[in-house]
Structures are given as C-alpha cells and as structure tokens.
Amino acid sequence: MTALAAAPVTSCRDVPWSRARELAHAAPTPLPARRVPLTRAAGLTLAEALCTGQALPAFDTAAMDGYAVAGPGPWLMSAGAVCAGAVEAPGKLAEGEAVEISTGAQVPRGAEAVLPLEHAVRAGATVRGPAPTLGKHIRRAGEDAAAGACLAPPGTRAGPALLGLAAACGHDTLPVRPRPRVRILVTGDELIDSGRPAPGQVRDALGPLLSPLVHTLGGEVTGVRPVPDHPAGSLATVVLTTAYDTEVIVVTGSTSVGATDQLRRLLSEHGARWVVDAVAVRPGHPQLLAQLPDRRWILGLPGNPYAALVAAHTLLAPLLAGLTGRPLPVLPRIPLTGQVRTTPGRTRLVPVTWDDATARAVGGHGPAFLHGAALADALAAVPPDWRPGEPVGLIPLS
C-alpha cells in the first residue's frame, strides 16, 4: 500500500455536543446505491423513494368472507362463487342479486357491499341479512394508494413492514445503500481479551461493546484487532496496511495527548482532514473524527468504556447515518428527574430509564463503568444549564 500524501490539516476543536452530531452527519457523501433482492434488503437504507406502479388495492376487493350483494335484500343467489386469486373478472351483478365471495377476491361490478357470512342466512337460492351500508366491507381500487404514489422517501430503513409494502407494490428488488464497513482497532498494552485480568491488566470491554453497536447503528464490522501502544508507530502501521475493504476505522484509546497516544500524531503526519477534534461533552471529551486522503474515515473513541459509548453515539452514529443517506435522528425530549451533576460549558450524557412522561437517571456511569448503561433505556443529553424536571434529548439504547 502506498504512503498517504500530505494535505492541509484543518481543526474544529471542542465542538458543542449537538453541533458535533451535525458535523459528523454532514461530513460524508452517501455510499453508492446498489439494487438487491427483497430477501437481502432487510436493515439497509432506501437510496430512492419507494413508489407503487399500480393502485393499491389494484381492484375492488372483498374485505370479508360472505356475499357480494346488489340492491336491497333478500337477494337471489347467482351461480358459482368468486374466489381469491381468480384472474378472470366475475360477472356483473344485477339489482337484487348476490354471489358468494371470499376475502381478497375481486368484487363483481354492480355489487354495493359485502354481507359477512356470519350475518347472512341462506335458504336454497335466497340469502337474507341486515341491509349493509353502501360500500361496506369492500376495499375500493386505489383506496390505499394511487398508481405512481411514493410511499417511503429515500433514507428510510428497510424494516419488515417496508419490505412487505415493497412486495405489495410489485417490487422484486430495491435500490439501497449498503452498510458501511467498519474496522475496529482497540489500543492498549494493558488489555486482555479473555479471562480474569491480573494486576496491571484490564479486560477489553470495547471489542464486545462496539461490534453489536456498529451493527445496530447500520454498519458492518469487518474485523476487531488489538493494537499495542509500543512500539511507537504501531497504530500507523496497522492503519496504513489495513485493506481498503472498509469505509470507517474506529480507534479506541490513543485519542488524548499522552506519550503513548498515537492517533493525533498519525492524523497530523498523514494530512488528515479534521471534522471534529474533541467535543464539549462529559464523559468522552477526547473524541475525534477525521478523513484520510484515501477517503477512509478515522473515528477516535476514548479508551474508557462508558466514555467510548457516549462518543460512539455522538460521532459514529451520525457518521454511519450520513454514509447510508439516513437523516440525522431528531431526539425525543422528555422531562428528566433524579440526581444529575451538570458540567459548566459541557453537555453531560447520563444513562436513564424512561416512559412516555418522564426520564430518570439510573446512576452507575463513571467513564470506565457500564453498569448504568447496561440497565438504561436511553442516554440523556443534559445541557450545562439544565434544572431538575426540565426536558432533555434522549438517545434510545435499544
């Protein structure tokens, strides 16, 4: 792999928390779209609006099993029955006639309503029942959507309901943006990845935390690799030799200015374009986002697990949304109660439980401690001037 060319370095330091989210979302260009079968589109993002080429429903449809009726009863039964899936259009009903019909079947011309089976009494060639309201139990053609209607905008996540809607519209494939590929580099000589740590060692919590989080946020992890702090330059070696099968490299730790922190030196020496250089937030202040000249994104997260979780929701989540063409989520605002210590000039993110009316801080959220986050429903973004009971923005964790 060739060395990275030098380029001017710009900096955006100590960015307010909400502004940092906006910058991370606006920085990337969405990944190129590709067309995939519906069976492979789940969880991806629409690159174009989902439109229907036909009216929905495409024909007048029976909404109940029963009898299609014309005019007032009692009704004289027509021969046969109208079944769902029949391609040939049923014959027209005359005044005073009825025909047996199944749910989902095409309603005959002239029919004014469907009399449900449980409300009907049939005796020989005659059927009786309460006079149904005009149009009752008939889904009219185009009632749900007209032909050509666009039903979901670009940037919509392809969840189960959208895939079913796409199939109902007649689509076999969808134009989507792929999941951004993310490689995770966990730095630190003190980290071990299994067993109980000995004195001086720390069990790695970030590899197990970040992999499922990346998937939840819409990315695809291509690998998790430990990187030692020594010798100096080891991080640069790994970054520069990482295969170009990834759009985002997440580096945990090494984001501060200590002797063993290598990330800022790497970015400076290789001409990275800075987007965010530290965020006015607690915990998670020394987080960063930059782009290398080869267009790969470098995201630096603090080494403490809870601080890294905060930083991932601050910069990584908006970055992945921008790469997939999804809008930046608008955070719900809920009144917050409980003991929360504000920080002058900085947003504080705290784990909370919440219902429709109130969020409550749960505690247990030191920079290195994930207890509160493990029990929480959301992270609350508490501004410096917050007062108990005032609403705050919430980032759902599930």
Image (cartoon, helix red, strand yellow):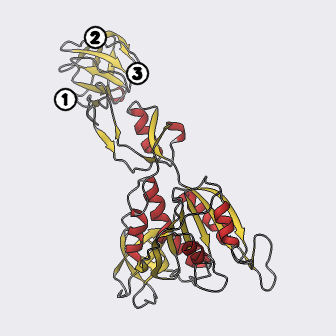
Picture layout, residue 318 above or below residue 229:
above
In the image, residue 175 sits, relative to residue 358, either above or below, namely: above
Instruction: Establish if 353 lies above or below 62.
Output: below
Question: Which residue is more in the foreground, 125 or 229?
Answer: 229
**Residue 324's x, y, as percent?**
45, 53
Residue 340 visible to an observer of this rendering: yes
- Taking the spot 57% from the left edge, 77% from the top edge, the residue there is 264
Q: Give the residue number, with chain letter if any, for mark 2.
A: 91
Secondary structure type for disc 3:
loop
Q: Tag 1: residue type?
A: Leu
User: Callout 3: few (<14), some (14-19), or many (20+) C-alpha neighbours within 10 Å?
Assistant: some
Q: Position of residue 279 (x, y in %)?
A: 46, 79
Residue depicted at 65% across the width and 57% down the height:
1
Sequence-earlier tag: 1 or 2: 2
Residue 387 left/right relative to 174: left
93 on left or right of 80: left
Q: CA distance from mark 3 to mark 2?
A: 15 Å
Q: Secondary structure at mark 2?
A: loop
Kindly indicate the quadrant of the structure image that contains residue 113: top left
In the image, what residue type sits under mark 3? Ala
Q: Position of residue 369 (x, y in %)?
A: 62, 81
* Mark 1 → mark 2, Cα distance in angstroms: 20 Å
